Image: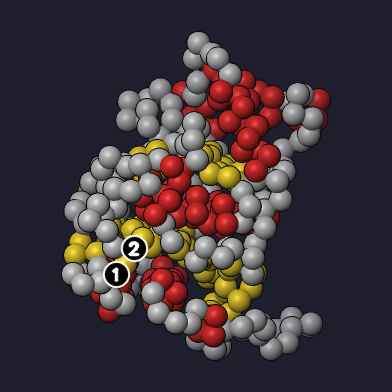
Amino acid sequence: MLKLPNDGPATGRLLSHVLTGDGPAAIVHAIARAQPAVAARLGAGRLHGDPTEIVGVNDTGDKQKALDVGAHHHMIAALREAGVRQVLSEEAEAVIELNPEGAWDVAMDPIDGSGSIGIGAPLGMLFSILPAAPEGFLRTGEAVVAAGYASFGHSMDFGWSLGDGTHIAGWDAEAGEFRMVRENVTLKPTASTIAYNASNERHWNAGLQAWVADLRAGKDGPLGKNYNMRWLAAAVGELHRILLNGGAFLYPADRRPGYENGRLRLVYECMPIAFLVEQAGGLASDGAQPIRYRKPLAVHDMTPLIFGAKDEVETILGYLAEPTEG
């Protein structure tokens, strides 16, 4: 590794010294330990084969790439060993039973942002942990007791919360383990960076289109400040960036067929994000209510999602609440 003039030994507590005990902490640690193998295969690109090869279609019609399915099976094996009762994965139509006597269930997106596999864009995974219950995953986000993500970029990072704040660790290749980087992340209530897919603006309702117009007016408009815009096309990448640097993200519902209820998956994408963001002092909403109150009717339900800095999210929600004809 290149050494910079002021570099010294790696610092930060080892994750194994932080995530101790059993229950959700042990499951979170097991998930963390499974990530380096995924990152290594992602980093190998096409050296051993094509990770972008289409090998199937998931329940919501998205094409499954080889890395999607490989990461799914890799994580299923890790969660089985960790004693998890059952798993809901984006890459499987039905819930997968692992250990019938297990006390915890896990919902996961094994590879988030897989449309960008192979081009160097940020990718990651998302998960949440719920206590075992007869209703399985058809519960509101209030049932979530822990959540987390992995981010695969120029560094490999792992963020999580056990309901005691949101924390981030970075991969220390020399130690072969994650080390703590940020503890008790706190989102500033205001931000100057907003993430959304501008190509969809014309499909939004009138309230959101009014917000975009005011956003672009910058300091000369009603919002009174200039904004930057970002779009990584991977919710986990946006989450990681927002936790580190602030900002807000939105993927709202729109008028296109199939997008009336948004496009992100409620249980294994939006609920983990909401849990982590709220633990960091931010907000996460479907546009009408907090994500944690939204109850899925099916395990692969979709939802609109707005999350990030409290004041910025509240501003967007205010525009959505204005009576419009759109």
| Mark 2, secondary structure of its residue | strand
| Mark 1, secondary structure of its residue | loop
- Rendered image coloring scheme: secondary structure
The residue depicted at 61 percent of the width and 49 percent of the height is 282
Q: Is residue 50 visible?
A: no
The residue depicted at 61 percent of the width and 43 percent of the height is 248
Please, is residue 34 above or below residue 50 in the view? below
Q: Which residue is mark 2?
A: 131
Q: Is residue 226 visible?
A: yes
**Is 24 displayed left or right of 54 in the figure?**
right
Please, is residue 11 above or below residue 125 in the view? below
Q: Nearer the viewer, residue 250 or 141?
A: 141
In which quadrant of the rendered view does residue 127 lie? bottom left
Question: Where residue 166 appears, x then y in whole percent?
Answer: 58, 63
Please, is residue 125 above or below residue 319 in the view? below
Q: Do the numbered discs 2 and 1 sit on residues whose CB atoms are within 8 Å?
A: yes
Residue 140 is marked as none
The residue depicted at 58 percent of the width and 31 percent of the height is 317
Residue type indicated by callout 1: Ala
Question: Where residue 56 appears, x then y in whole percent?
Answer: 21, 53
Residue type indicated by callout 2: Pro
Question: Where residue 311 appears, x then y in whole percent?
Answer: 68, 39
Q: Residues within 10 Å of mark 1 (few under 14, many from 20)?
A: some
Q: CA distance from mark 2 to mark 1?
A: 6 Å
**Is 8 displayed left or right of 99 in the figure?**
right
Q: Which residue is mark 1?
A: 103
The residue depicted at 49 percent of the width and 31 percent of the height is 288
